[in-house]
Structure formats: C-alpha cells, structure tokens
Image: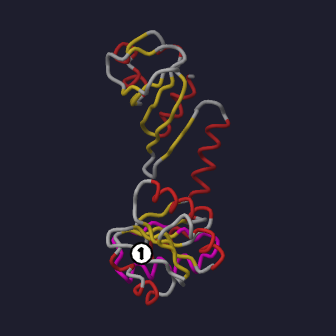
C-alpha cells in the first residue's frame, strides 16, 4: 500500500533488501525525498516507519510506476540483486519512463552488462567493491580504502617514515610517488586540508589520492 508518492526531483529506490534499504535510509538522512518500492509486503511494512513514501508495487510494470509518478523523478536506484530478471525489467521500465539517471546493483559482470544495455547509466558491484576494500584493510597497509571505476582511489594510511618531520613540500611525496596528500588527521586534533607548508609528524594519518596502483604502493611504505 502506498503512503504517498514523492515529489518531482526526488529519488526512487526499488528493492528494500539490505542494499536498497541502506541506500534509502542514507538518502533520507542526507535530506532527500525518497520513494521506496518493493513487491514484498513484509519489507514495505518493516520500512514504513523509516521511509515516508513507501509503496508495495511491481517495479517491473511501467504502468504501475507511471501511476506513482516515477516519470517525474530525476534519479532512481535499483537495489534488486538476486532476482536478475526483476532487476533488468525494473531498469527497462525506468528507462521507458525517461528517468534521467538510473543506478543499478549488479551481482556479476554479465548482469552489469545487461543492465547497461537495458538503460542503466551507472552500475555498481557492492559485493566486489567491499571485497576489494576488505582485502586492502586485512593486509594492514591501509586504514580505509575507496576505489572508483576509473582506476582512481582514495585511502587513509599511516605516515611513512620518510615523510615524518618534514613539510609536504620538502618530502616531495607527490613527485616521488605520484599521489596527492589531500589531508592530515593528527590524534586529538581536527582534520586539516594539506598544503605544501603542512608539517607531517609520526602518528599522523594521511588521506591520499591517486591512481589505484600508486596509492597501494605508497600505503605499503607505512
């Protein structure tokens, strides 16, 4: 049962499993107007106290989505994973309605390719991304790690010995290792955006960015 449709410019989230539910909850926390759709009545009921606009409907049916006003929404996230047919058909329905930006979860590369050909503008592989992140954290070389689709990464890592006790300009980390120090977090102090004259001390945490392979090599120094 629908509570309400969302207003124009909101975001539609299809599928209230672990991924879709987490996306919807995060979007609401960030202040966005969210319409959540799932065919499972139990899931809809479970999320009814957390999401203002939550609907039990068949998201593969473009007529049902049209009745909900989805064609007036600029962005949509398809969080369905295990039911590949429902995932693909939901993306197709959104595409037919002319939704400007469609994000979709994929569980395999083939699944992702089908989603792209069906109309998804962005395909995410949450399980693969999390596996990559955990692999980096388990090695102990990085404290946190995020990789983007184009081979670019951001990581939080400890200060390597050669950088301690010098400014960023003097240590020349960028020219030596091809990475950029974005910021520094010193225990007991606020985060500081990095500047050439910023002094780095042992125990500082560095936020660095750059090509994934170079970020990995730099983190290994620590």
Relative to residue 146, is residue 55 depicted above or below? below
Looking at the image, which residue is at 62% across and 56% down? 127
Front in this rendered view, residue 136 or 206:
206
Relative to residue 167, is residue 1 depicted above or below? below
Q: Position of residue 9 (x, y in %)?
A: 32, 68
Front in this rendered view, residue 210 or 75:
75
Front in this rendered view, residue 195 or 176:
195
Q: Where's the C terminus, which quadrant?
A: top right
Looking at the image, which residue is at 38% across and 14% down? 167
Q: Position of residue 116 (x, y in %)?
A: 45, 71
Q: Where's the N terminus, which quadrant?
A: bottom right
User: Is 98 situated left or right of 201 in this image?
Assistant: left
Residue bearing the label numbered 1: 119
Asked if the magenta segment contains residue 135, the reply would be: no
| Residue range corresponding to the magenta coloring | 79-104
Number of residue marks: 1
Label 1: few (<14), some or many (≥20) within 10 Å? many
Q: Position of residue 106 (x, y in %)?
A: 56, 66
Asked if the magenta segment contains residue 82, the reply would be: yes
Question: Looking at this rendering, what residue extends furthest in the top direction?
Answer: 165
Looking at the image, which residue is at 57% across and 63% down? 21
Instruction: Give the color scheme: rainbow, by chain, secondary structure or one colour.
Output: secondary structure
Relative to residue 167, is residue 131 depicted above or below? below
Q: Image quarter for residue 57?
A: bottom right
Q: Position of residue 82 (x, y in %)?
A: 64, 71
User: Is 46 situated left or right of 213 in this image?
Assistant: right
Mark 1: secondary structure: loop
């Amino acid at each position: 049962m629908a509570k309400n449709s969302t207003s124009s410019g909101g975001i539609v989230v299809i599928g209230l499993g672990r991924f879709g539910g987490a996306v919807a909850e995060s979007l609401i926390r960030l202040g966005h107007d969210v319409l959540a759709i799932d065919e499972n009545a139990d899931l809809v009921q479970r999320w009814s106290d957390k999401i203002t606009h939550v609907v039990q409907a068949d998201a593969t049916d473009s007529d049902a989505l049209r009745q909900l006003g989805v064609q007036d929404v600029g962005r949509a996230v398809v969080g369905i994973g295990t039911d590949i047919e429902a995932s693909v058909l939901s993306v197709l329905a959104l595409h037919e309605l002319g939704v400007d930006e469609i994000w979709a979860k994929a569980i395999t590369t083939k699944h992702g390719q089908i989603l792209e050909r069906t109309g998804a503008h962005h395909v995410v592989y949450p399980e693969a991304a999390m596996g990559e992140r955990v692999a980096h954290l388990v090695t102990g070389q990085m404290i946190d790690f995020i990789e983007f689709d184009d081979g670019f990464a951001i990581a939080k890592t400890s200060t390597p010995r050669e950088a301690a006790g010098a400014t960023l300009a003097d240590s020349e980390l960028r020219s030596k290792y091809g990475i950029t120090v974005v910021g520094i977090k010193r225990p007991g102090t606020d985060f500081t955006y990095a500047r050439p004259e910023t002094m780095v001390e042992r125990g500082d945490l560095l936020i660095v960015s750059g090509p994934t392979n170079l970020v990995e090599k730099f983190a290994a120094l620590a």
